[in-house]
Image (cartoon, helix red, strand yellow):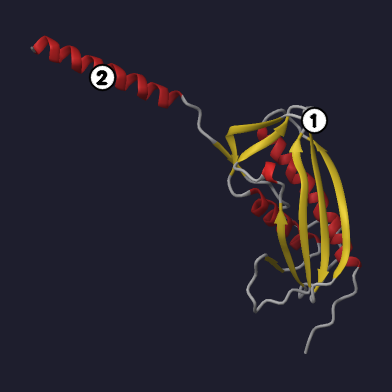
C-alpha cells in the first residue's frame, strides 16, 4: 500500500514539474505602443496656442482591429503575431499618437480626442480612416489613410488620401512598430501643414 502511494505521489510530482517547466519555458507576450514625437520640431513656425483641435474618430479595417500585430507575408497572406500585441486598441493608439504629434507640430496646447465632452467646441476636427497599416515582406511599413479636416460646424474643408512608406530598421516587431510611428509622424506633418495654412477661425460670441 505504501509502495503504491509512493509511486502515485512521485508520478503526480513528475507531472507537476513537467507542467511547471512548460509554463516557465513559454516566452512572454510583448506589448507595443506606436512612438510619437517627444519634443517640438524646431523648424515648425509658432502656432496659435489657443487653437482647439479635435482628433478622431479614427477607424481601422477589420483585419487590423485585433490585439495581434499584423504583417504581410505576401500580397495575399497575412501573419498574426500571437506573442507580439498592441498594448491598446490600434485605433486608439493611432489617435493618441496623432494627437501628441499635432500638439507639437502646430503647435497647440489644446488637443482633445474623440469623443470629447459637449462643453468642448473644437475650432477644427481631424477624422481618419486607415486603409492599410502594416509591414510587408520587404520590411517596408505602409500607411494608407483617408483623412478629413472639418470646421467647427462639421463642414468638410479638406479631404485627402495619403500613402506613406517607411523602411523598418530591423526584422523584429519593435523595429516595425518604430517605423509605423515614423509613418504616423509624416502623416501628422501633412495635417499640421494644412492646418497652419488655414485662416484663424472666428470665435463665437
Height in image: 70 above or below 9? below
Q: Secondary structure at mark 2?
A: helix
Residue at 59% x, 42% y: name it. 67
Q: Which residue is mark 1?
A: 75
Q: Quadrant of residue 99?
A: bottom right
User: How many numbered tags mark residues here?
Assistant: 2
**Chain-order first, disc 1 or disc 2:** 2
Height in image: 137 above or below 7? below
Q: Is residue 18 left or right of residue 183?
A: left
10 Å crowding of disc 1: few (<14), some (14-19), many (20+): few
Residue at 65% x, 46% y: name it. 65
10 Å crowding of disc 2: few (<14), some (14-19), many (20+): few
Q: In x, y percent, where is residue 5?
A: 13, 15
Q: In x, y percent, where is residue 66?
A: 62, 43
Quadrant the N terminus occupies: top left
Q: Quadrant of residue 165?
A: top right
Closest to the observer: 17 or 43? 17
Q: Which residue reaches farthest bottom? A: 205
Quadrant the C terminus occupies: bottom right
Marks 1 and 2: CB-CB under 8 Å? Answer: no
Q: Is residue 141 left or right of residue 159?
A: left
Q: Residue 13 shows which numbered tag?
A: 2
Closest to the observer: 28 or 144? 144
Q: In x, y percent, where is residue 62?
A: 68, 45
Q: Secondary structure at mark 1?
A: loop
Tell me how far mark 1 sits from mark 2, CA to CA.
50 Å
Residue at 90% x, 70% y: name it. 198
Amino acid at each position: 500500500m505504501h509502495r503504491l502511494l509512493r509511486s502515485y505521489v512521485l508520478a503526480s510530482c513528475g507531472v507537476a514539474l513537467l507542467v511547471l517547466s512548460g509554463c516557465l519555458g513559454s516566452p512572454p507576450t510583448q506589448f507595443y505602443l506606436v512612438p510619437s514625437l517627444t519634443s517640438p520640431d524646431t523648424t515648425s513656425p509658432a502656432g496659435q496656442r489657443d487653437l482647439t483641435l479635435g482628433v478622431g474618430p479614427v477607424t481601422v479595417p477589420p483585419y487590423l482591429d485585433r490585439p495581434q500585430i499584423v504583417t504581410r507575408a505576401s500580397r495575399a497572406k497575412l501573419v498574426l503575431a500571437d506573442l507580439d500585441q498592441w498594448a491598446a486598441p490600434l485605433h486608439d493608439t493611432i489617435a493618441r499618437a496623432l494627437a501628441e504629434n499635432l500638439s507639437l507640430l502646430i503647435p497647440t496646447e489644446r488637443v482633445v480626442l474623440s469623443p470629447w465632452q459637449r462643453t468642448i467646441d473644437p475650432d477644427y476636427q481631424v477624422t481618419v480612416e486607415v486603409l492599410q497599416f502594416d509591414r510587408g515582406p520587404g520590411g517596408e511599413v505602409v500607411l494608407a489613410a483617408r483623412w478629413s479636416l472639418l470646421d467647427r460646424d462639421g463642414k468638410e474643408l479638406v479631404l485627402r488620401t495619403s500613402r506613406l512608406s517607411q523602411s523598418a530598421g530591423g526584422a523584429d516587431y519593435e523595429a516595425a512598430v518604430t517605423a509605423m510611428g515614423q509613418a504616423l509622424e509624416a502623416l501628422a506633418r501633412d495635417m499640421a501643414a494644412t492646418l497652419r495654412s488655414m485662416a484663424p477661425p472666428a470665435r463665437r460670441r
